[in-house]
Image: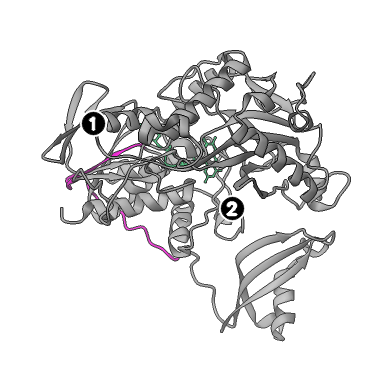
Amino acid sequence: MVKEIQLRVPLSEEQQQDILVIKSAQALAVDKSDITGVKVLRKSIDARKPKIIFNYKVAVYIREALPKSSEYQFDYKDVSKAKPIHIIGFGPAGMYAALRCIELGYKPVVLERGKNVQDRRRDLRAINQQHVVNEDSNYCFGEGGAGTYSDGKLYTRSLKRGDVRRIFENLVYHGATDQILVDAHPHIGTNKLPKVVQNIRETILKFGGEIHFETRVTDFIIKNNTIQAIQLNGNDEMAANRVILATGHSARDIFYLLHKKEIALEAKSFAMGVRVEHPQHIIDSIQYHCSGERHELLPAASYSLVQQVNGRGVYSFCMCPGGFIVPAATANGEVVVNGMSPSKRNNLFANSGIVVEIDVNRDLPKYEKFGPLKGLEYQKNLERMAFTAGGRSQTAPAQRLTDFVEGKLSEDLNPTSYQPGLNTSPLHSLLPKLIGSRLRKGFSSFGQKMKGYYTAEANIVGVESRTSSPVCIPRNENLEHPQIQGLFPCGEGGGYAGGIVSAAMDGERCAEAAVKNM
Ligand code: FAD
């Protein structure tokens, strides 16, 4: 017999031996010796009250053996001689599209402008230390896409839990910890992600797929509204009749190329703002009601905040407990910040994007002349402003949180995890009013919701501009571009995902659509 139940384990009892078996036996009124196993289905922390509780959802096996833990089989077959599907971009969408092609018996041919994970590291060092951005290899471009040197948070708002489970199990198959299958807020960590990504690459190659690094797609050859070939590195052409376009939201050259070729695009609403960084112990003390260090069994605390300000949402985005702020620019002449954290989340800082919704239909009248690229141009302008204010390098403009809200230039700044360094700047006056004034009100109200959050010990750092794509590449019910047969816009760049998991799910969907009628 198997029974699914919820258990509440106080922090003080969490480490007690066999605590889940003991609690299950009590809850089900059975003898402890009849319980053959307890499988954790979900684990979360309830820290709303000072007495912290671990909530478990468990399956209790009574006089019955525990089954194998995976629900999905990944049936990869040799596709070396199969028909090709071309996939542009090897981020989560491209990786999962390639894996799905192999399961379906088609050969993925991946074109990726960036380098493999190992070689990519050198270019990340160059951004952090020499302030030089390699425009093909950076925090957004390269093997594994923007997801590789990230936090590896695997949260998604998707309601298709089955699909989410499949994505998670595939990550575990490729070396991620199986803890992600049960944690309410699963994450992998930037130190573990490259190995998972490398294992995915090895599966694709082992089963006959192709991956071409340092290969940027520079044109599409289209005849009679049907894709015929793709141009690589401005030179060679590669014949292709099914192309999954998974280039992410930072591939501006792809948006410009499509626009120049009069291939329909649409402006999409998105969000922009700043990254805020607190000492982690401040967030821990607020969330865990403690004054000193957090309990050793508790992870670095996180938060999620949202507030309506003058008709727009202001909210926290991609919060990284125990993490680092990173320079996520994809071109020289711009400053873009984002966040990542290691698997242990043991750095001394907590950072989070705090962003304001931008409604492209109402908020950007001065940018109308850019048509579907108006959001992109607005985003670009802000990133250039940050570059100038930061001192024309990857040093980022920053202000103490309280000075930003009170409208004062900071005399000095707090210590930071951001390696290229910070430059004190009047972000309160440099940010457009649409964003700046809403952020200031948003921060004040966050300070009321979380006592201690609004503090001079926090910095805000500009700009957090790449939250989601400002452009949508339309597609029809077959997931094909309505004008171009054989072109499948996919993942975050197409406007169909926001984060690692939803991009991966969209990659699988696009692979399934691309192989239809082949
Ligand atoms: P991308 O990951 O952007 O991949 C696109 C790929 O296409 C890139 O590798 C790029 O090099 C390649 N490409 C672009 N143009 C071309 C071209 N012309 N030719 C060939 N190749 C091309 N999301 C989360 O869910 N959790 C997190 O914790 C998280 N943290 C993040 C931290 C950072 C620092 C960053 C930058 C992002 C983070 N994200 C996070 C967002 C997440 O990484 C993206 O949502 C996700 O990677 C999008 O997947 P994608 O495959 O659609 O696009």
What type is the residue that disc 1 sits on?
Answer: Lys
Residue 48 spot, x, y in % from top left: 78, 60
Question: Is 289 positioned to the left or the right of 373 in the image?
Answer: right
The residue shown at (71%, 37%) is 440
The residue shown at (65%, 83%) is 34
Return the residue found at the far right.
291
Question: Is 488 positioned to the left or the right of 362 in the image?
Answer: left
Q: Is residue 247 above or below residue 113?
A: below
SS at badge 1: loop
Give the position of the N terminus as an image quadrant. Answer: bottom right
Residue indicated by mark 1: 261
Is 441 inside the magenta-drawn segment? no
SS at badge 2: loop
What type is the residue that disc 2 sits on?
Answer: Pro
Residue 289 is labelled as none
The residue shown at (52%, 54%) is 156
Residue 395 spot, x, y in % from top left: 62, 18
- Examine the rendering and report whether any part of residue 375 can be seen: yes
Residue 442 spot, x, y in % from top left: 70, 43
Residue range (magenta): 71-89
For residue 27, what is the image quadrant? Answer: bottom right
The residue shown at (76%, 53%) is 297
* Mark 1 residue CB less than 8 A from any atom of ligand 1: no
Residue indicated by mark 2: 186
For residue 483, what is the image quadrant? Answer: top left
Q: Is residue 318 above or below residue 298?
A: above
The overriding secondary structure of the stretch rendered in magenta is loop
* Mark 2 residue CB less than 8 A from any atom of ligand 1: no
Q: Could you say which is closer to the camera, residue 204 or residue 356?
A: 356
Is 78 inside the magenta-drawn segment? yes
